[in-house]
Image (cartoon, grey):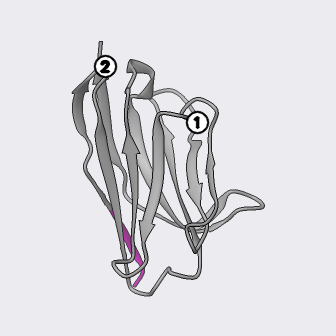
Amino acid sequence: QVQAVESGGGLVQAGGSLRLSCAASGRTFSSSAMGWFRQAPGKEREFVAAISWSGGSTFYADSVKGRFTISRDNAKNTVYLQMNSLKPEDTAVYYCAADLHIATMKPDYWGQGTQVTVSS
């Protein structure tokens, strides 16, 4: 059974930082792209960042460029999202996306989500 489990969410003040982790299990994801999406209350789920299987290519939503960094450790089957200079509008549930198809930005697997709340 494939699982993607996020951790690292929490409450932080504006300007602060958080690091999210997504540990995948059930099979290796070292040959597939991974990503992060988020969903704020009353809004649709939106793309945040993605990383190729090798880590050599990364993609970001305009709203997070220069503030967020996605990375991965294939030996640990884990992808990370370092979030700096957080803003209240970054408040959302953040979801890990595994087996992400870059052309469509649609994953085969979702994590259960982790809440990030940024206070002003």
**Camera-side residue of 2 and 85:** 85
Most common SS among magenta residues: strand
The residue stretch that appears in magenta:
1-5
**Residue visible at 45% across and 21% down in the picture:** 89
Which x, y percent locates residue 19?
A: 30, 47
Q: Is 77 situated above or below 61?
A: below
Which x, y percent locates residue 96?
A: 45, 58
Dividing the picture into quarters, in which one does residue 44 lie? top right
Residue located beneath label 2 in the image: 14
Viewport quadrant of the N terminus = bottom left
SS at mark 2?
loop
Q: Amino acid at mark 2?
A: Ala
Name the outermost residue toward the top.
Answer: 120
**Residue visible at 31% across and 19% down in the picture:** 14
Density class for disc 2 (Cα within 10 Å; few <14, some 14-19, many ≥20) is some
Q: Is 118 situated above or below 18?
A: above
Dividing the picture into quarters, in which one does residue 62 lie? top right
Density class for disc 1 (Cα within 10 Å; few <14, some 14-19, many ≥20) is few
**Residue visible at 46% across and 40% down in the picture:** 68
Circle nearer the viewer, 2 or 1: 2
Which x, y percent locates residue 56?
A: 61, 66
Which x, y percent locates residue 41?
A: 44, 28
Residue located beneath label 1 in the image: 44
